Amino acid sequence: MPEEERETRAKRHKKSKRSNLIMNLSIGLIVLTVVIILFELLFGGSANDNDPNQLGQNSGSDNSSFVIPPKDESSEDGSAESEEESEESSSEEPEESEDEAEINEVPSDDPNVIRAYVGDWEPIGTEQSEPHVTQYDETSVDWAEMKEASSEVTGVSLANMIITWIGNNGEQRVTVTFTDSESGQVYKVYLSWVTEKGWQVTRYEELRAAS
């Protein structure tokens, strides 16, 4: 009996020793695995973030890629030129609006008048010297400047103006009545002489017929 007990104890001791060895190995493997995972989390992530070759992989978890298209220099140049042109045109617009006269439509009791307008038009300018004497000769400079002032205000070209009447309307004042040969519209323009600046339109009317 003592020998059997010693043999049994030896087997138990051997089996226990083997179990402890397996357990220690398992614990060692687990600890090593945990250390490797921690190392990857702490150092592997930052390394991948700094690696430009991994940027596409990290951001492409949805299997899609982001590609920056090359810049089209010609389109950039064209857009820059269009922006410059728009800036130039916008900067020029106020100047043009400042040059435009303020025009207002006014009522008229004359049944022959369709519409009448008054405005703060500038004098046309003149080549004549003072003192000014009104000339009704159609070959005179005065006549030509009256027509030019009337054309500028009404928008009817000199070539389309058929003069019906240029008459005295008071001291240094005249009226010019003409027909637009293109549209057939009749106009009557009121002008006053401004010293050293020429004829200035003060009013014009659109008539039903030449009076």
Image (cartoon, grey):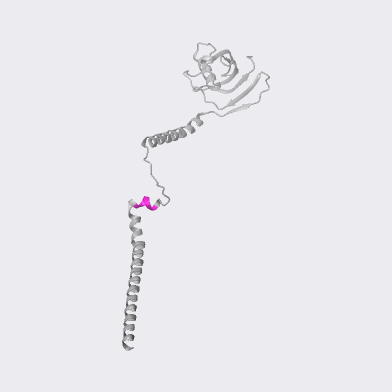
- What residue sits 31% from the left and 87% below the top? 3
Q: Quadrant of residue 204?
A: top right
Q: In this orientation, which residue lies closer to the viewer: 155 or 194?
A: 155
> Which residue is at a point 60% across and 28% down the rendered structure image?
104
The picture quadrant where one finds residue 48 is bottom left
Highlighted magenta segment, given as a residue range = 54-58
Q: In which quarter of the image is the C terminus?
A: top right
Q: Where is residue 207 in the image (x, y as percent from the top left)?
A: 63, 18
Q: Quadrant of residue 109?
A: top right
Q: How many labels does the image show?
A: 0
Q: In this view, does 115 lie to the left or right of 50?
A: right
Relative to 124, residue 65 above or below: below
Left or right of 35 in this view: 182: right
Which of 96 and 55 lies nearest the eye of the viewer?
55
Magenta stretch secondary structure, dominant: helix
> Viewed as shown, does residue 42 lie left or right of 207?
left
The x, y position of residue 113, in whole percent, is: 65, 20
From this view, report whether residue 25 is shown above or below residue 117: below
